[in-house]
Amino acid sequence: MRDFTPLWVLEELISERANLAQWAVKNVVHMLENGATIPFIARYRKEQTHGMEVDKLREIKTLMEELK
């Protein structure tokens, strides 16, 4: 099986689909990939997410999993 490189950037595509700031999506994706939970991000990382609500964080996680 060969590895492939997608023709899109994960954070850009999620940002576009969810209508969110790309920098905030990038921060959320990074935190999720490093093991942070949605409740932790929502409660303690508001400055890195531009105060995103839990529903938006879940949407990012779902899109991230689908696209990977």
Image (cartoon, grey):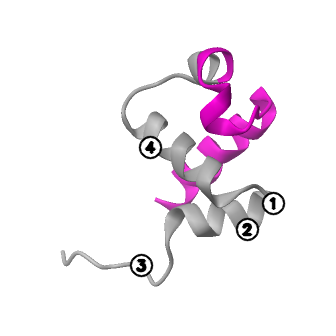
Amino acid at dot 1: Asn
Q: Taking 7 as reference, is 44 above or below it?
A: above
Q: Which residue is mark 3?
A: 6
Amino acid at dot 4: His
Kindly state the secondary structure of the residue where label 4 is placed: helix
Q: Nearer the viewer, residue 38 or 49?
A: 49
Residues under numbered marks 4 and 1 in contact, where contact means CB atoms less than 8 Å apart: no
Earlier residue among tags 2 and 4: 2
When asked about the image quadrant of residue 43, the answer is top right
Amino acid at dot 2: Glu
Find residue 59 and report its horizontal and vertical position in percent: 72, 44
Kindly state the secondary structure of the residue where label 2 is placed: helix
Residues under numbered marks 1 and 2 in contact, where contact means CB atoms less than 8 Å apart: yes
Nearest to viewer (mark 3 / mark 1):
1
Q: Residue at x 69, y 36 (%)?
A: 57
Q: Which residue is mark 2?
A: 16
Q: Which mark is residue 19?
A: 1
Residue 29 shown left or right of residue 43 in the figure: left
Residues under numbered marks 3 and 1 in contact, where contact means CB atoms less than 8 Å apart: no
Residues under numbered marks 2 and 3 in contact, where contact means CB atoms less than 8 Å apart: no
Which contiguous range is marked in magenta? 42-68
Nearest to viewer (mark 3 / mark 4):
4
Spatial CA span between label 2 and label 4: 17 Å
